[in-house]
Image (cartoon, rainbow, N blue to C red):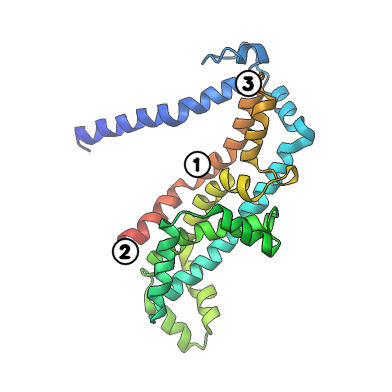
């Protein structure tokens, strides 16, 4: 390692510390303070730790709204990510393996999904006519539609690294198209699959605008909307507001910490070899 690389790494570490670690520590300290001490908004060690009391009060607020929000967000995230992985892997496989005149049209649609911003009002009108507005399964389909293009792009690049000989060997053994995909190809897509699961899970779980537009109603609240709803209630109780922020920040943070290496591997494998 050269001296320049060493100091570049140190600089990156310091920047990461101030950008990610310091704000999280500030949130933790604020969530552990009492009402009077938190009102001063000072970055210091709490005089007395009220972490558990604040946690219980936030969970019990508004008839356990936060627990309902966790349930709704989990259902939406798991459902949307599951569909995203299966559908995008299938489309990416077909685009990479089977060349036809429709490929260009499909690929143009995928690129349009990455570049064209979503139209909120027409989407609401479609959901209303389908009976999917204000429903969790409607929200799942919205998240799938918005994340499908990126997932297809990643899977297609990764599938290009898998030799066609595997497909041909499976065909010789009498495997049908679905068997080739699920038994031969899909198990080899683990790095890309983990990348899609982690990236999309964090994005969907932290999504604020889409549930605000397409999933109104107290019974449909998600974790990010609780922050919006609790902001007025806890405006004079910053300790509880920061406790709510802490609770909705921890799950995505844990996922990223445990799977960040898989994310890098999945992104670089398709980019380098594709």
Residue 98 placement (x, y as % from top left): 41, 80
Spatial CA span between label 3 and label 2: 50 Å
Q: Which residue is mark 2?
A: 273
Q: Is residue 138 above or below residue 50?
A: below
Instruction: Describe the element under mark 2 as helix, strand or loop.
Output: helix
Q: Is residue 38 above or below residue 7?
A: above
Q: Which mark is residue 257?
A: 1
Q: Identify the residue at horizontal 54%, vertical 45% (top origin).
A: 255
Residue 266 placement (x, y as % from top left): 42, 56
Figure quadrant of residue 45 = top right
Q: Are marks 1 and 3 in contact (CB under 8 Å)?
A: no
Instruction: Describe the element under mark 3 as helix, strand or loop.
Output: helix
Q: Which mark is residue 213?
A: none
Q: Residues within 10 Å of mark 3 (few under 14, many from 20)?
A: many
Spatial CA span between label 1 and label 3: 27 Å
Which comes sooner in the sequence, label 3 or label 2?
A: 3
Q: Is residue 246 above or below residue 191?
A: above
Q: Identify the residue at horizontal 73%, vertical 40% (top origin).
A: 67
Which quadrant would the C terminus be assigned to in this image?
bottom left
Q: Which mark is residue 238?
A: 3
Which quadrant would the N terminus be assigned to in this image?
top left
Whether residue 66 appears in this view of the structure is yes
Q: Residues within 10 Å of mark 2 (few under 14, many from 20)?
A: few
């Amino acid at each position: 390692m050269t001296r320049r690389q060493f100091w570049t790494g140190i600089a990156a570490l310091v920047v990461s510390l101030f950008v990610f670690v310091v704000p999280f520590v500030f949130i933790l300290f604020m969530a552990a303070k009492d009402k009077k001490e938190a009102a001063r908004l000072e970055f210091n060690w709490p005089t007395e730790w009220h972490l558990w009391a604040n946690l219980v009060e936030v969970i019990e607020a508004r008839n356990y709204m936060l627990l309902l929000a966790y349930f709704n967000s989990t259902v939406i995230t798991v459902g949307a990510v599951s569909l995203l992985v299966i559908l995008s892997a299938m489309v990416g496989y077909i685009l990479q393996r089977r060349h036809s005149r429709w490929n260009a049209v499909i690929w143009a649609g995928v690129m349009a999904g990455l570049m064209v911003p979503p139209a909120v009002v027409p989407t609401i009108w479609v959901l209303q006519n389908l009976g999917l507005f204000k429903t969790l399964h409607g929200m799942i389909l919205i998240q799938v539609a918005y994340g499908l293009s990126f997932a297809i792009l990643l899977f297609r690049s990764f599938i290009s690294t898998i030799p066609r000989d595997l497909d041909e060997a499976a065909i010789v053994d009498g495997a049908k198209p679905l068997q080739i995909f699920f038994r031969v190809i899909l198990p080899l897509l683990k790095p890309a699959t983990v990348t899609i699961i982690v990236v999309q899970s964090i994005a969907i779980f932290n999504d604020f605008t889409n549930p605000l537009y397409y999933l109104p109603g107290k019974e449909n609240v998600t974790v990010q909307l609780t922050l919006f709803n609790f902001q007025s209630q806890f405006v004079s109780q910053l300790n509880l507001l920061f406790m709510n922020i802490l609770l909705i920040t921890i799950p995505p943070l844990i996922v990223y910490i445990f799977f960040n290496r898989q994310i890098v591997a999945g992104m670089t494998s398709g980019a380098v070899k594709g």
